[in-house]
Amino acid sequence: VQNTPILLLDEPTAHLDYQRQHGFFQQLLPLVQTEDKTIILSLHDPNLALRYADRIIVIDNQKILADIDCHQPQYAFIFQNTLTQLYHHPMTLLKQNDGYMVSW
């Protein structure tokens, strides 16, 4: 809105349906790719993070559990293991055409 170099968004897709969540992120991508903006946002949906993030920081009880560079090999498996640790429940990683999806 103010043409700042950094956008800070707190749960911006929390009350949106599935289609509008992805539409929202599709609108953000050009800001990062062509306008060189940095976008920092909080999410509770691991699949949105896996699909759109360049970097994922997982926080639990004010502690950083993982700082994951999504351009490194095996980043999705690191994320899967981190979520298993966070939720004390095995998470399953599903391969899709355009990335990965985490399932409970």
Image: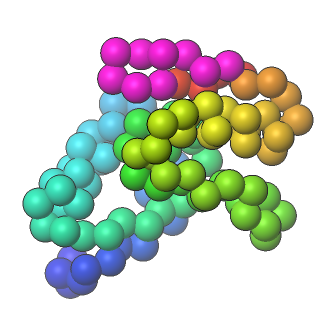
Q: Is residue 29 visible?
A: yes
Q: Is residue 33 left or right of residue 86?
A: left
Residue at point 80%, 44% (across, down): 86
Number of disc labels? 0
14 versus 41 height, above or below: above
| Magenta highlight: main SS | strand
Q: Is residue 97 above or below residue 77?
A: above
Residue farthest front in this picture: 73
To which quarter of the image does residue 64 belong? bottom right
Q: Position of residue 8 (x, y in %)?
A: 42, 73
Q: Residue furthest left?
A: 34
Q: Which residues are magenta?
A: 92-100
- Asked whether residue 53 is in view, the answer is no
Closer to the camera in the image, 95 or 40 = 95
Left or right of residue 46, residue 65 in this image: right
Q: Is residue 90 above or below residue 70?
A: above
Q: In which quadrant of the rendered view does residue 23 lie?
A: top left
Residue sitting at x 32%, y 69%: 38
Question: Which is nearer the eye, 78 or 92?
Answer: 78
Most distant residue in the right direction: 88
Residue 44 covered by magenta stretch: no
16 on left or right of 57: left
Q: Nearer the viewer, residue 53 or 70?
A: 70
Residue at image coords 73%, 25%: 91
Position of residue 22 measured from the top left corner of the image (x, y, whole percent): 33, 37
**Quarter the N terminus occupies:** bottom left
Classify 97 as above or below 5: above
Q: Position of residue 47 (x, y in %)?
A: 52, 34
In the rendered view of the protein, which quadrant contains the C terminus? top right
Question: Please, which colouring scheme is shown?
Answer: rainbow
